[in-house]
Amino acid sequence: MKKLIVGISGADGLQMGIRLLELLRDLPHVETHLVTTPNAARMLPCVCGMELRQVRELADYCYDPRNTEAAIASGSFQTDGMIVAPCSMRTLAAIAAGLSDNLLTRAADVCIKERRKTVLLTRETPLSLIHIRNMESVTAAGCVVLPPVLTFYSGAQTARDMVDHILGKALLQYDITLPGFRAWEGK
């Protein structure tokens, strides 16, 4: 059984976090631990037409972002790591600075200090030098920065196909292959 922490920040692309939970829910060997930021909770109704409770129903375990004493806030709670999808520039900056001011950033800090895979699907364009330096900082600390860049070799026909491919690439970091994921096979 794999245990993955799923963080959802308030950046554009909330649908990626929701879709990640949907895809993982169908994998019986993966247990999900969800933490959202307050901004994500505020943005869900206007961006996705969903309430936080509906998103929480997709996860195995859910945590209040203010509860920095939750299980995922401790290194002694064993997980396989964390995916933040989407990862806002505010969340990226907090993670880069080691600022554990909410449970999402604390859980990321724990994963980094415990050398557990931490994948950040950063959302912003264009990037400022500050964003790039924060990405450099978290990469040096062991995170994988995986901006949701569109790929076309997978044969994706819809936006959902593209999102699924990006999430498939993120999950490969944990040796999880989504059914139907198409890796590049060369010529």
Image (spheres, rainbow, N blue to C red):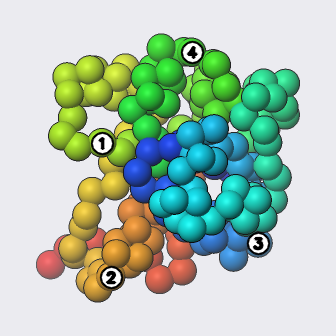
What's under tag 1, amino acid-wise?
A: Glu
Q: Are marks 3 and 1 in contact (CB under 8 Å)?
A: no
Label 2, residues with CA under 10 Å away: few <14, some 14-19, many ≥20:
few
Q: Earlier in the sequence, mark 1 or mark 2?
A: 1
Q: Earlier in the sequence, mark 4 or mark 3?
A: 3
Which residue lies under the disc numbered 4? 99
Numbered badge on residue 81:
none
Observer-side mark, 3 or 1, equals 1
Q: Earlier in the sequence, mark 3 or mark 2?
A: 3
Q: Are marks 4 and 3 in contact (CB under 8 Å)?
A: no
Q: CA distance from mark 3 to mark 1?
A: 33 Å
Q: In what quadrant of the picture does the C terminus appear?
A: bottom left
Secondary element under disc 1, as helix, strand or loop, is loop
Secondary element under disc 3, as helix, strand or loop, is loop
Q: CA distance from mark 1 to mark 2?
A: 21 Å
Label total for image: 4
Q: CA distance from mark 4 to mark 2?
A: 37 Å
Q: Quadrant of residue 138?
A: top left
What's under tag 2, amino acid-wise?
A: Thr
Numbered badge on residue 28:
3
| For residue 134, above or below residue 87 | above
- What percent of the width, then of the height, locates residue 101? 64, 19
What's under tag 4, amino acid-wise?
A: Leu
